[in-house]
Amino acid sequence: MKRYVCEPCGYIYDPEVGDPDNGIEPGTEFADLPDEWVCPVCGLGKDEFVEEE
């Protein structure tokens, strides 16, 4: 599973962990996140994330 980084703040979305505080179950791929999901640190949208290298 690929991890994605929020470029402005550096938060890393790890699909193996998910975002349980915001209702995202572990095992949820980045592409499967709801469109309204935002970075839990800075509040920006999915379009600010890039695939981790």
Image (cartoon, rainbow, N blue to C red):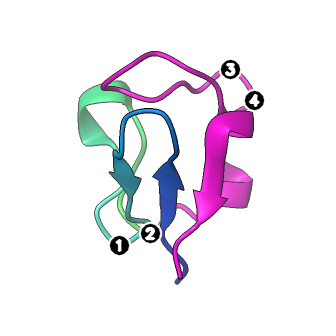
Mark positioned earlier in the residue sequence (2 or 3):
2
Residues tagged 4 and 1 counted as in contact (Cβ below 8 A): no
Q: Which residue is mark 4?
A: 35
Mark positioned earlier in the residue sequence (2 or 1):
1
Give the distance between the C-alpha atoms of the residues marked 4 and 2, in whole angstroms: 17 Å
Q: Which residue is mark 2?
A: 27
Asked where in the image residue 18 lies, by quadrant, the reply is: bottom left
Mark positioned earlier in the residue sequence (3 or 1):
1
Give the distance between the C-alpha atoms of the residues marked 2 and 1, in whole angstroms: 5 Å
Q: Which residue is mark 1?
A: 16
Mark positioned earlier in the residue sequence (4 or 2):
2
Picture coordinates of residue 40 (x, y %)?
A: 35, 26
Q: Which residue is mark 3?
A: 36
Give the distance between the C-alpha atoms of the residues marked 3 and 4, in whole angstroms: 4 Å
- Closer to the camera: disc 4 or disc 2? 4
Q: Is 30 displayed left or right of 11 in the figure?
A: right
Closest to the observer: 10 or 35? 10
Q: Tag 2: residue type?
A: Gly
Report the magenta stretch's main SS. loop
**Against 27, is 2 above or below?**
below
Picture coordinates of residue 43 (x, y %)?
A: 46, 15
Closest to the observer: 20 or 39? 39
Q: Is 28 displayed left or right of 40 in the figure?
A: right
Residue range (magenta): 28-53
Q: Tag 1: residue type?
A: Glu
Label 3 crowd (10 A; few <14 / some 14-19 / many >=20): few
